[in-house]
Image (cartoon, rainbow, N blue to C red):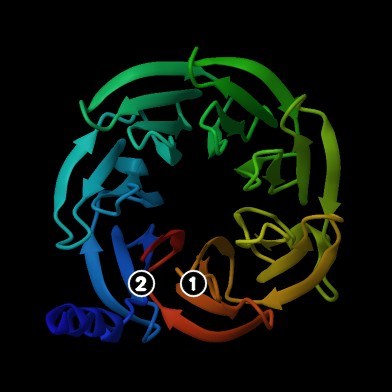
Amino acid sequence: MKRLLLCTTMILASPVWAGEIWVTNEKDNTVSVIDVDTLSVIQTYATGERPRGITFSQDFSRVYICASDSDTVQVMDPDTGEILHDLPSGEDPEQFVLHPNDRDLYIANEDDAVTTVVDTETHEVVAQINVGIEPEGMAVSPDGKTVITTSETTNMAHWIDTEAREIYANTLVDARPRHAEFTHDGNELWVSSEIGGTVTVFDAADQAQKARIEFAIQGVHPDRVQPVGFEFTEDGKTVFVALGPSNHVAVVNAGTYEVEDYVLVGRRVWHMAFSPDKSQLFTTNGVSGDVTVIDVANREAIKTIKVGRFPWGAATRP
């Protein structure tokens, strides 16, 4: 009995791991690893050419990286930085999304106008789905039944049935859609339009448009307000939207679709990732070559972290 109590005490006394934010650097062909506890870069690993999209396997034992100009998706061991192997991604992979089955990787191939589906266990291409011109944004519904590809030139969101691996609906959005996300409950799809300057919200059940969110920042020309990546808070009530060369992140009420605030960050903000405890948000700022740390509760920037040249994608590792 005494031994059991001792073991329990030791477990409770163990330090909590703060986690990491992984950032792809387009111009350096590297990924920077930021320690969430110290808010500093602790590792830099080499990748293929022009790394963009990045995501982890469900157990965080592998990290997938879109090496766009190398025409491949690289699989890295996050503990060592070693490239384990490449996956046959098709030409110019921009973004991707990992299916909830932790096996099927859906990849947007910008040059080929297709979405490629790769089996991450067999390393084989299992499907290629024709979509619109210049696909980029990718999303998967929480139940795994639907995958979204957005096409920048066609200005559409393509709704893909993951069982049939076929498009079952196409919905128009504003010019140059860049990113898509389902709400946590799967009831809505949000799509950002970079040149259109808007975010469109769709009802996932019938693909009907529910809202169209616009942005206006005092002292910033509307042409510089270009929505790209965005992230929902854990409770699903708030959405942080990166607004590109406006150098701001918008804070949107997910229930009313109203913009509540703007946060000034670095130059040319692309994408974001929350810390494991969701208290901080890390933004990738391409032109300034840094990451801004936002205090989520107070909606204010608290630190800037220098990374590589043209940081683009971001992902969290607990």
Task: Return the x and y of residue 21 as percentages of the image width and height.
Answer: 39, 68
Task: Return the x and y of residue 36 as percentages of the image width and height.
Answer: 39, 78
Of helix, strand and loop, which one carries label 1? loop
Q: Earlier in the sequence, mark 1 or mark 2?
A: 2
75 on left or right of 301: left
Q: Nearer the viewer, residue 233 or 179?
A: 233
283 on left or right of 107: right
Q: Quadrant of the N terminus?
A: bottom left
Distance Cα–Cα, label 1 vs label 2: 9 Å
Vertical comparison of 260 with 226: above or below = below
Q: Which residue is mark 1?
A: 277
Q: Residue furthest front?
A: 1
Q: Residue at x 52, y 86 (%)?
A: 303
Q: Quadrant of residue 202?
A: top right
Q: Residue at x 38, y 57 (%)?
A: 26
Q: Quadrant of residue 296?
A: bottom right
Q: Are marks 1 and 2 in contact (CB under 8 Å)?
A: yes
Q: Can residue 174 be seen?
A: no
- Residue type for callout 1: Asp
Vertical comparison of 169 with 258: above or below = above
Task: Return the x and y of residue 240 as percentages of the image width and height.
Answer: 67, 63
Question: Label 2: few (<14), some or many (≥20) within 10 Å?
Answer: some
Q: Which residue is mark 2?
A: 19
Q: Nearer the viewer, residue 97 or 92?
A: 97
- Given this view, does label 1 or label 2 mark the residue nearer the observer? 1
Of helix, strand and loop, which one carries label 2? loop
Q: Nearer the viewer, residue 7 or 49?
A: 7
255 on left or right of 134: right
Count all numbered tags in the image, as a single digit: 2
Disc number at residue 126? Answer: none
Q: Can residue 294 be seen?
A: yes
- Residue type for callout 2: Gly
